Image (cartoon, rainbow, N blue to C red):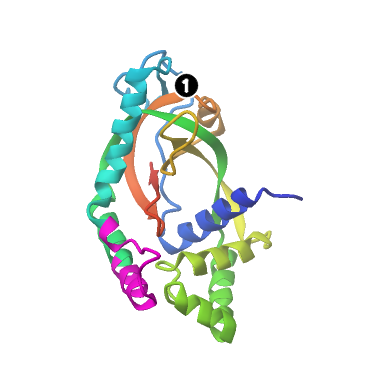
Amino acid sequence: MQIEKGAVVRLAWAGLVAFLLATSGASAQDEDTAQPDSNATEETTENQPEQTGEVGNETENQGTADEKLITAMLEDAANYKSSYEDSTALQEKKGRQLKKKIAAINKKNIGRTIRFSQIYVYDVEAEQSITKYGKTKARSIIQKLRRDPQTRELISASGGDDPRENPVLALMVGLQLMACKKCMAPTGRFEVTFTFDEANLTWHKVVKVVESEAAALRYKKGQAYAVSGQIVFLEVNDELNVKLHMK
């Protein structure tokens, strides 16, 4: 069975994040009876997906405003972003500082309610979660990687042996879990991934979990919706690209 490389990375990361950050219990409150509205209004108590109108200058400006809600959370994190002009020692120092900053950003924003007036559906996928067997397998993989001199050196150079703070290690473990049929299982929920412009030119993403297939299928790829919910965690890479997970 062939799996798109991007999908492998997303699934591997999502599976390990669910294990390491204990977010697999997050859930949305979307009702199966919800129908998309023709205009963006305040969300109803049913949290139905709110489809917005046609794209124009006004809505493009709104997309920029929505994206600023995320970039504002990064505060001064850009000060710790490495440059090709930095020495290895300085890059390592900035890397440590950035990890601490990202941890502080998450601590400050987790649980916060946020609303995006117009973001676009990038894709809708079944949510995968790591199983009890998978958690045991993940710990075994990490121990094995730590014992290997070559991978130990790579792990050390990319951020240390804590997978919660080292995306390279998290990805290495997650990719190995992909080959394990007993390690991952669908939760019955679905992840709706949004981007901030129709052409998907921005790197920032929003991921919202919905409770059922019926609710998930009401989101149409490429269409714009008003979306709100509580922040579960922010996934931030070294380039300060953010994937905001919400419920």
Q: List the residue tagged with mark 1.
A: 33
Q: Decide if residue 156 is in sight here.
A: yes
- Which x, y percent locates residue 229? 33, 37
Q: Is residue 214 above or below residue 162?
A: above
Secondary element type, mark 1: loop
Left or right: 61 as drawn, with respect to 48 = left
Q: Amino acid type of disc 1?
A: Thr
Q: Nearer the viewer, residue 193 or 185?
A: 193
Magenta-highlighted residues: 78-97
131 lies left or right of 115: right
Q: Residue at x 52, y 77 (%)?
A: 154
**Who is closer to the viewer here, 32 or 67?**
67
The residue lying at 52 percent from left, 27 percent from top is 222
Q: Position of residue 50 (x, y in %)?
A: 40, 22
Residue closest to the eye, 41 or 127: 41
Q: Point out residue 82 in the picture as x, y percentages from the top left corner.
A: 36, 64
**Where is residue 166 shown, x and y percent of the image?**
44, 68
Question: Quadrant of the rendered structure where residue 182 is?
Answer: bottom right
Task: Name the residue at 35% across, 21% down.
Answer: 59
Asked if the magenta segment contains residue 130, the reply would be no
| Outermost residue toward the front in this view | 85
Residue 87 in magenta stretch: yes
Q: Is residue 217 above or below residue 69?
A: above
